[in-house]
Image (tube, rainbow, N blue to C red):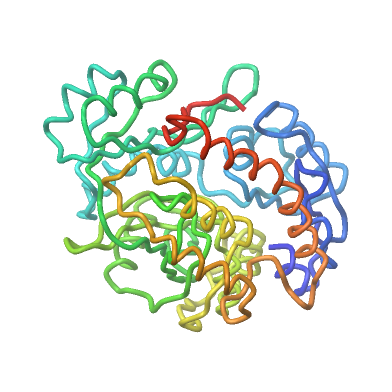
Amino acid sequence: MIRSLGRRGIHVVAADSNPRSPGFRSRYAAERLVYPPPTIDGQATVTALARAASERRIDLVIPVGEGTTVLVSGARERFGDGTVLALPDAEAFETARDKLATVELAARLGVPTPRTILVRTAAEALRHAADLRWPVVLKPQASRKVLERGEMEAFGVEYAADGTALAAQMAPLEGHCAVLLQEYCRGEGHGVGLLMDRGQPLLAFQHRRLREVPFTGGPSSLRDSVPLDPVLFEHSARLLEALHWTGPAMVEFKVGPEGPSLMEINGRLWGSLALAVKSGVDFPGRIVDVFLSPLTEPAAGRDFGYAVGVRSRDLGLELSWIASVLAPRSAHPFLEAPRRREAAAAALRLFDPRDGFDVLDAGDPMPGLAEVAGIAAKVPRHLGRALRRFSLPGAARPETRAQSR
């Protein structure tokens, strides 16, 4: 985002809760702002951002991380009339955040989804699991929950192969969030990134996930651009059109032997945005055009062209993927795990320029160097954790994913 906007001559204020943020080192960051961590004190985060937007006369605020996006969306009234928020309508945003509402919308529109049942307790989950095929996925209805004092509770996706595992995974979630029980879909992860203007697609881009962290399912560490699939595009555009969506969103699918199945609508900027930009799709620049152009002006024309076969990796996530594959086997043996020799091959081509990087860039080198330094600083902690996993009995058990941050 910072590079793309800066190259267009836009005055960019880089903002992050991490004072060592690689983005602060970019040559295109004209100013910098450190705000309180949204996971600890969301109210202070919003106060700092709203004050800075007023004092620095910011025209457009573009939230990026999920926590910050949720907080800013819930406090739209705190930002003055002179500042535009790059967000969709509040109701549309909440529908995309609510995974049950997303599944229900998809059902009305004929977009395929996994079989889904909403549960709130372990007993309820065990009662309904018989209606689904094992293994099942436990997907929190919302991955972020803002508590009364402003701190944020985060939830992750889990898996269960039988009733015993299901009860164990549900126990820590009871009283914290409702859970979608879904049949596990095998297949390849695809994301369709779109920029919409009042329900009409302006930009479209599709990528395939080559590696995910964890490998059971999560953000991609390595991905490539692929041709826009007309079926996936139609499903994605129909969902966002129904929400009268304005702004960026990525619609995620699993594509397997039984065809595509909707995973979720990521109603914000996505982690692999760098790949789209490298492939020739200027999402950042067009976002500015959409939100700062008068509403009476017609949207600019569609642009669905981009380079295919481009790759890009998140270096930190790629190292995590390699470590996770080399570590003791997954706690979910029913999920197909990559072979250790694949991790060795990935390590050998870590710096192969053909795969590219999200942050490392010869024309703007300092963010990449800051990223590498940040990764190096974490190595001793991760190494110690890995050694403990090797030495402690039962260390491969999954960690509780409900946590207050």
Residue at position x 49%, y 48% from top?
Answer: 327
At 52% from the left and 49% from the top, the residue drawn is 88
Quadrant containing the C terminus is: top right
Residue 227 percent coordinates (x, y): 39, 79
Viewed as shown, does residue 373 lie left or right of 326? right
Who is closer to the viewer here, 337 or 77?
Answer: 337
Q: Which quadrant of the figure has residue 160?
A: top left
User: How far across and how far down the image is residue 372, in percent?
Assistant: 74, 60
Percent x, y of residue 8: 75, 74
Q: Quadrant of residue 339?
A: bottom left
Relative vertical location of residue 77 with respect to residue 32 in this rendering, above or below: above
**Depth check: 25 or 395 in front?**
395
Which residue is located at x 70 percent, y 48 percent? 379
Q: Is residue 277 above or below residue 163?
A: below
Q: Position of residue 290 (x, y in %)?
A: 59, 63
Kindly identify the residue that appears in the image at 57 percent across and 62 percent down.
296
Drawn side of residue 242 relative to residue 37, left or right:
left
